[in-house]
């Protein structure tokens, strides 16, 4: 996961310390606390219950982001002090249970240390996990595959929100309510996540065009007339898939820090992952056991892609020299299979025509407290981030002439949270220029 969106999911780490606290204390039940981040306050609910034998298990809810529970990994306990790490996100925690058993206080470290205190919830003080005023339904998109669709209501033309990688549509619970005065707002949870179906995690089942087809199936099932699609992060590939193949199905596409190589292939600078996938597929065709239909053309294309891949690898090598990769985690864990399948299923979109486009980029990204204790490495990382993001913004301006490109400096990757007013202003101004929807 991109380091810029780690902030939005790192509260899952908090769950670790509660799983095996003091054997003599009963910590089953609900705990709740508020995390004070650089940009916002996040309310977290921790549900702890008994597991097998003397073990405990639990579920964490970051209720200001999603009502979906988050998983846990490992921990250690010694003399009442609990230490844990969330290795995929480089998060560690150390906390202590109070003698009265009603609070757990500690420090979460992810870039910089942040105090965190949990209090035992009662019926009178307990927070509601999902308080957003939306309707929820499961919509069939393919065979027995159903997607979670949220409907926040509202007045005006239809607007559909698509999420970043790993998020459920509930990530928009707050933002959607700022849109309902002007639009009828829906949200879709991608297959493999949240309450949506999770088909076998193969690249075919999670290919970009397949995910785009899911969105089209929801549009048809809800009888939406040319909605505006708004996508964050990885959802850029679904926007580009639909805009490339079925621009007549939508009124406009809005990319919220979503215009990266999975959404638009930069013809000038290439894209390492996409180039690598294309080279692999062409080599497989070359040695498939039977001659391809046009072997000469295949070899010519392969040579071009090999040059692009070499260029990308050389740039990656330079970046790694400037910013060494972090040490391997003590307890490595693989990303969710659906995440791997989506990364393997990326496709190459060179341009998008026939539909109005607004692309908002965070340039450069706000890295929060990440590496503040290592100013030279942080500066190098910021320079790489600004270069790559600026390149993508420029690619949209060059390759997608119908796109309006907006750059918001020092916004978080979740810019609809960190810069909500800016995003709403740009979205409303852009939508106001669109032809009026048919009544």
Image: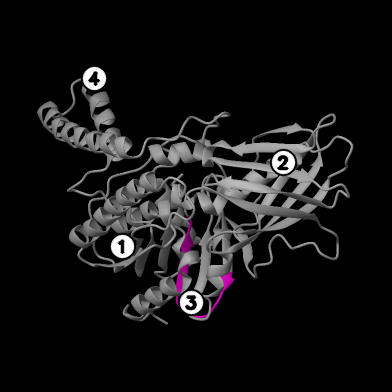
Earlier in the chain: of badge 3 and badge 4, it is: 3
Earlier in the chain: of badge 3 and badge 2, it is: 2
Would you identify the image quadrant in which residue 132 lies? Answer: bottom right
Q: Residues within 10 Å of mark 3 (few under 14, many from 20)?
A: many
| Residue with the mark numbered 2 | 17
Q: Disc number at residue 287?
A: 4
Tag nearer the camera, 3 or 2: 2
Q: Secondary structure at mark 4?
A: loop
Q: Which residues are magenta?
A: 152-163
User: Circles 3 and 2: CB distance less than 8 Å?
Assistant: no
Tag nearer the camera, 4 or 2: 2
Residue 255 inside the magenta-drawn segment:
no
Tell me if I can see residue 337 in this picture: yes
State the CA–CA distance, disc 3 to disc 2: 43 Å
Q: Disc number at residue 183?
A: 3
Q: Disc number at residue 247?
A: 1
- The percent position of residue 324, horizontal first and vertical second, equals 37, 35
Q: Residues within 10 Å of mark 1 (few under 14, many from 20)?
A: many
Q: Secondary structure at mark 3?
A: loop
């Amino acid at each position: 996961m991109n380091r810029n969106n780690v902030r939005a999911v790192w509260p899952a780490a908090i769950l670790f310390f509660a799983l095996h606290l003091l054997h003599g204390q009963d910590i089953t039940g609900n705990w709740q606390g508020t995390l004070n981040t650089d940009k916002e306050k996040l309310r977290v609910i921790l549900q702890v219950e008994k597991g097998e034998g003397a073990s405990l298990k639990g579920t964490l809810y970051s209720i200001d982001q999603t009502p979906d529970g988050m998983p846990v990994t490992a921990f250690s306990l010694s003399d009442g002090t609990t230490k844990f790490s969330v290795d995929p996100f480089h998060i560690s925690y150390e906390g202590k249970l109070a003698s009265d058993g009603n609070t757990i206080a500690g420090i979460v470290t992810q870039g910089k240390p942040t105090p965190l205190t949990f209090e035992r919830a009662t019926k009178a003080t307990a927070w509601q996990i999902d308080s957003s005023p939306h309707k929820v339904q499961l919509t069939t998109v393919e065979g027995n595959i159903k997607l979670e669709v949220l409907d926040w209501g509202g007045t005006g033309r239809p607007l559909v929100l698509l999420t970043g990688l790993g998020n459920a549509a509930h990530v928009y619970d707050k933002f959607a309510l700022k849109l309902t005065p002007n639009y009828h707002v829906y949200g879709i949870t991608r297959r493999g996540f949240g309450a949506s179906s999770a088909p076998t995690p193969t690249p075919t089942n999670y290919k970009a065009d397949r995910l785009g087809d899911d969105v089209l199936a929801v549009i048809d099932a809800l009888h939406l007339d040319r909605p505006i699609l708004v996508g964050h992060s990885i959802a850029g590939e679904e926007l580009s898939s639909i805009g490339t193949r079925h621009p007549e199905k939508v009124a406009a596409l809005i990319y919220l820090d979503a215009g990266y190589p999975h959404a638009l292939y930069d013809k000038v600078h290439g894209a390492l992952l996409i180039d690598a996938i294309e080279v692999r597929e062409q080599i497989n065709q070359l040695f498939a056991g039977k001659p391809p239909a046009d072997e000469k053309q295949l070899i010519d294309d392969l040579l071009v892609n090999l040059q692009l891949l070499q260029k990308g690898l050389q740039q990656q090598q330079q970046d790694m020299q400037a910013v060494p990769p972090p040490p391997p985690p003590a307890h490595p864990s693989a990303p969710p299979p659906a995440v791997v399948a989506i990364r393997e299923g990326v496709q190459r979109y060179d341009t998008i025509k026939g539909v109005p486009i607004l692309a908002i980029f965070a340039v450069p990204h706000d890295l929060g407290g990440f590496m503040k204790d290592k100013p030279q490495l942080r500066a190098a990382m910021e320079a790489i981030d600004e270069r790559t993001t600026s390149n993508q913004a420029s690619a949209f301006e060059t390759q997608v002439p119908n796109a309006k490109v907006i750059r918001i400096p020092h916004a978080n990757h979740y810019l609809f949270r960190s810069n909500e007013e800016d995003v709403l202003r740009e979205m409303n101004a852009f939508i106001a220029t669109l032809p009026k929807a048919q009544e």
